[in-house]
Every structure is written in C-alpha cells, then in structure tokens.
Amino acid sequence: MNSTSISKKILEVKDLTISFNFSRYQSKSLKDLSLDFIKSPVRFFFNRPKKVEILKKISFDLRNGERLGFLGINGVGKTTLCRTISGMYGDKDGIIVNGTTRAIFDTESVIQPELSGKENAWIITNIIYSHLSKVERAEIVEESLEFSELHQYINSPFKIYSKGMKVRLFLSIVSAKPCDLLILDEVFNGGDEFFNEKVSSRIKKVIEGSGAVLFISHDKETVRSICNRVIVLGEHRILFDGDVNEGIDFYVDKFSE
Amino acid sequence: MHYKNQLLIISTLTIAEMKARYRNTIAGIFWVMISPLSVFAVHGLIFKHVLKINVTSYYIFLLSGLLPWIFISSTITTTVSSFITMRDSLLSFQIHPISIIISKTIDSFINFFLPFLFLLVLLWEDVQIHPIGLAMIPIAFFILILGTTAICIGLATLQVFFRDTQYISNFIISVMLFLTPIFYPRHMIPSEYQVMVDFNPFFALIRMFKVTLWQFTYYDLYQALIHGLIACVIFIILSTIIWKKTRNELYINI
C-alpha cells in the first residue's frame, strides 16, 4: 500500500478553518438561561453567538508514505484538527481523503463494561474494521487476544480490567491491520513498559504498512522515531511544516521561550 | 462510511446493548417479557375489573395503546442521555452518534415487539382483525420506529447542550401518559378537549395500532396513517434542524 507510489495524494486539506460557538452552547441549565434572560432580555434574544476560531485557513497535503507528526502546546487544536479530518464533526469543506481512514483518540475506551474482554474485542473490531469480512474480523479478534497476553482474563467482565489491561487489548486490536490514512492520538500512553515496547514495534509495523499517518504525541523522541515530517501548530495556524528534526527544534525554541 | 459498514456498527451496538442489560440478572432475557407484561396486567386489572371501564375488547384496546406507548416512552428515557453516557466511545472511535440512537431504538423495539406478539397471540380469539388492518401493521411499526428515532435524536442532541432536557422529557412523558387516550378511549374525552388529542403527536403514532387492531374502518385507517406520517415527518424535520445546527459543537460539549 505504501510503497507503490510515493506521490499518491492521500489527504488534501485546503483553507480549512475550524471554529466553534462557545457562547451559545455551554451546557446551560434552565436556571442559567433564566438568569441570562433576567439580566438582559435584549442580549438574551438578539446577541449573536460568538464564534471562536481554533484554526484558520489550514492547508497541507499528505502523500503516500508520509508520516506526519503534529506538535503544539495543549489546546492548540491538534486533536480537533485530526477529529475534523476523520469526519467526526461531519463533512467539512476543504478536506479530501483518498482511501479508508482509521482514527484512534483514546486507548482505554470501553463500549460495554458489563461484557467480557473478548466480547468488547469483538465490538471494537466490528467498529474499527467494519469494512472487512467476518472471517477477517474473527482473525483480528483471535490474533489480538493472543497478542495482548490477557489469556486468563478474556472472559472476565471488562469493568474489572485495569487501565493497563484495557490499553493492551485496545492497542492489540488497533495495530492489527494497516489502512490508507491512519490517525493516532497519544496512543503510546498507559501500558506497562514491557508491553509498550512490544506493542510499539507492532504499531510501527502498522504505520509502515499504512498509506499515510497523522500522529499526535507530546513525546518528541517518539515523533522523531516514527515521523518523516512535522507540522507545528500555534497561533491558530501552521507555524512550521517540514523536516522532523528541524520541526522539533523549532517547536522547542518556540515554546520554551 | 459505506452504509453496510454503518449497519454492522449499528447491529454490533444493538447486540452489545441487549447482552449487557441482562448480564448478571437472575431472570435475564425474560425481563424483556416480564416488565411490559406486568404493566399490561396491572393496567388491565385496574381499568377493566376495578374501575370497570366500558370498552369492548378492552385487552385488545389496551394492547394497541399501552405497548406502543411503552416503546415510545422507554426509548426516549434510555436514549436521551446516550451521547453523554457514550462520551468516551464517541470521542475515541469514528462512531456516528446517530448510530448509537438507532441501535438503542432497535433494542427497545425488540423489547416491545416480543411482548406485543405474545399478547396478540394470547388474545387472538378476542381479536377481529380486518385483513387490511393486519397488512397495515408493518407500516404502523415502521412509522412508529421512524418517528420515535427522530424524537430521540432531537432530544439526545438537545441534552448535550441543555442538561434539563432529560428532566423535561421525563415530565412530558409522565403527563402525556394521562393526556393520551391509551387506557381510556378517545370518546370519553369531552368535545372541548378533543383538540388536545388532535394535536397530540404521540397519539398520532399510537392511533394506527388502535385502528388496525381494535376498531378498523377504512376511513379511520386512512386518517390514522396520514396523522402518523405527518407527526413522523414533523419529528424528522425538527430533529434534522436540531442536529444540523448543533452537530459542529456536539463533540466539544459531550
């Protein structure tokens, strides 16, 4: 998939602006709304919600074989950008993805805590690999359960799993197959150091097998070892786009001031 | 995402929901039957035998109103907070939020359909179902599911932004149980209050069952289907507006 053509464009982001209405939607209760109304009825009805722009006019391409690392301080919009690209916020103008996308934003998520590890493995596999056949999905479940080394716990309820056990199972499934565009957000956190080492090499293999990768991590060394390109986000825009080592140096210089 | 993939995700979530609900319970899957049947039995006992309500084939009348009502109310109650309770999953995977509502609605429909079928078979001798009425039941089911799903999508979305939604919807459900002709016939309502029934969207979804199972006439069937469809379309339009207006901010508020 990755080695056939380095020039195939997997992702195209053009003039993408991501903004949210924070003022209108703040999980207000009836009491809050009543107070707002009493304080200023005119503002309550006629005040236009304030749009906060997280990222402005972002443009970049991602080609086959590229492993792009996003760097930036907390709250700069790295995860939001990746969620937007993955289609979580609905269709957006300015994003074209050529191929299948797999996006993972949390490694200890539980679908049904009452069900067993094996049953949850099936659920996660069906969600992530819904495009594959049942036989292929069954192979992924079996292989992932084997890889996770949770043998005696696979039929225990998922709710009794420790954080590390959940991460083991989750990462084993996620890293089972490559795809055209792989989006990974802080996936190396949570497991014990021995399993992390084991799963890291498996994730790296999946990354190598995938068409293109968007990778978010605060660990600069992980970014250095996985990525071949870095984008530094800040001030609502792309501050740097280029070589990994230069990008990390730029990031350190910029934000350690 | 391809619709086939979405169907797989919806069926996976539905089966998981059903398995999880009755895990570690003694009666297990029998709760699907026990709960609605006991509600049905209690209503039947009180209105037919204690209050001696004068309605022909009362149990069929009750079946055609109470069971669809239980479906609507229980689906709303279980789905209204589902975007919030499924927050971790929604933020972790590429699950379309509406898939969660659809899967919970299907689960709820199975819980409604099994006791509905059981009671229909049990009361079969009392039923004088018109063949056309029988043929229309699947359409009534379809409109009921579609309308209820639309209500739940709208409410679950609103709940993300206005946490009072679940309390308001619970309150409305409690009130509507009495304002909707479910366990009493419509003709018992004084004419000056009939307008409440005319504009009751829940009754529009339920009335189709009353006509097909209890007192069938072609005119009533035509009216019931038109009202049911209108209510369903209104719910779909409203929930689409709410969804489209709030979709962008949904993930940052859950």
Image (cartoon, rainbow, N blue to C red):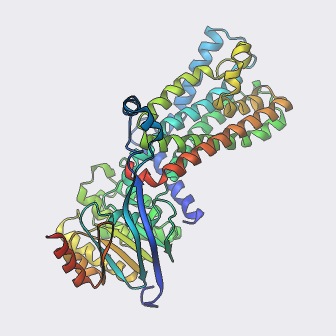
- One can see residue B15 in this view: no
Q: Is A88 positioned to the left or the right of B65 in the image?
A: left
Q: Residue furthest top?
A: B51
Measuring 55% from the left and 24% from the top, which residue is drawn there?
B39
Q: Is B43 positioned to the left or the right of A237 in the image?
A: right
- One can see residue A72 in this view: yes
For the residue pair A49 and A164, the one nearer the viewer reads as A49
For the residue pair A67 and A190, the one nearer the viewer reads as A67
Q: Position of residue B44 (x, y in %)?
A: 62, 18
Image height of B83 relative to B75, above or below: below
Measuring 37% from the left and 83% from the top, which residue is drawn there?
A66
For the residue pair B49 and B177, the one nearer the viewer reads as B177
Measuring 45% from the left and 46% from the top, which residue is drawn there?
A48
Q: Is B97 positioned to the left or the right of A148 in the image?
A: right
Q: Position of residue A250 (x, y in %)?
A: 21, 78
Q: Position of residue A7 (x, y in %)?
A: 45, 89
Q: Position of residue A76 (x, y in %)?
A: 29, 63
